[in-house]
Amino acid sequence: MAGKPVLHYWNARGRMECIRWLLAAAGVEFEEKFIEAPADMEKLIKDGSLMFQQVPMVEIDGMKLVQTRAILNYIATKYDLYGKDAKERALIDMYTEGIIDLTDMMLKVVTGFPDQREANISLAKDKAKSRYLPAFEKVLKSHGQDYLVGNRLTRVDIHLLEVLLYVEELDSSILDPFPLLKGLKSRISSLPNVKKFLQPGSQRKPPYDEKIIEKAKKIFKI
């Protein structure tokens, strides 16, 4: 019997958090081996564990997978969270790419220069309210179903919930004009596996702070 997936990353959100979310939503227990120092990263590279000398890396089913999208695609396929046919997968991919665009804007808030922080926050909030949230609200309105694609849970519902929680960290009222998104957030959050992941003590990572950012700079020699 295959063991638990092993996630190699530092002890923070970053590009591994969406992978943690998807595994948790699928009800898959996983282990984490944190990169705590530059030597840990150098060892993974020297051992040949990182194809492109980058993390995140996930050991799963005898493979050492890198590249976030490839990892997510494999997990979604393995646990039947990737739609029932090519059309549904195309929609899931399209919606997911939009979510990634917004997530990258959110990452700039914490990875950008300190003197640009307020401008990056303003940009992320503006684009969320004017571009991304209206688009997903429109999808839900167009079909009147409980989920974004195929009227059942797929990876894109999990990715969207994750980023909705992030934008709410910037502005707690940002979802007020989007009742269907608020409803989706409530439904997905109430699913047993997701609800468990949202509880204190789970492997979900907290928001960034200066201490976490400084540690990342040391680990990755930024």
Image (cartoon, helix red, strand yellow):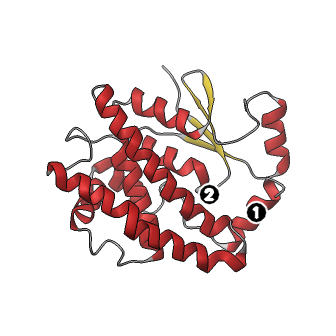
Write the residue at 26% across / 68% down: 178
Say if mark 2 contacts mark 1, CB within 8 Å: yes
In the image: residue 70, left or right of residue 159: right
Write the residue at 39% across / 77% down: 172
Q: Secondary structure at mark 1?
A: helix
Pointer 2 local density, CA inside 10 Å: few below 14, some 14–19, many at least 20: some
175 lies above or below 43: below
Pointer 1 local density, CA inside 10 Å: few below 14, some 14–19, many at least 20: some
The x and y percentages for residue 181 are 27, 62
The x and y percentages for residue 216 are 74, 59
First-in-chain label (2 vs 1):
2
In the image: residue 133, left or right of residue 50: left
The label number, if any, that marks residue 215 in the structure image: 1
The x and y percentages for residue 173 are 35, 78
1 lies above or below 151: above
Q: Is residue 204 visible?
A: no
State the image quarter where residue 177 is shown. bottom left
Residue of label 2: 12
The x and y percentages for residue 67 are 61, 37
Q: What amino acid is labelled 1 in the image?
A: Lys
Q: What amino acid is labelled 2 in the image?
A: Ala
Q: Is residue 183 visible?
A: yes
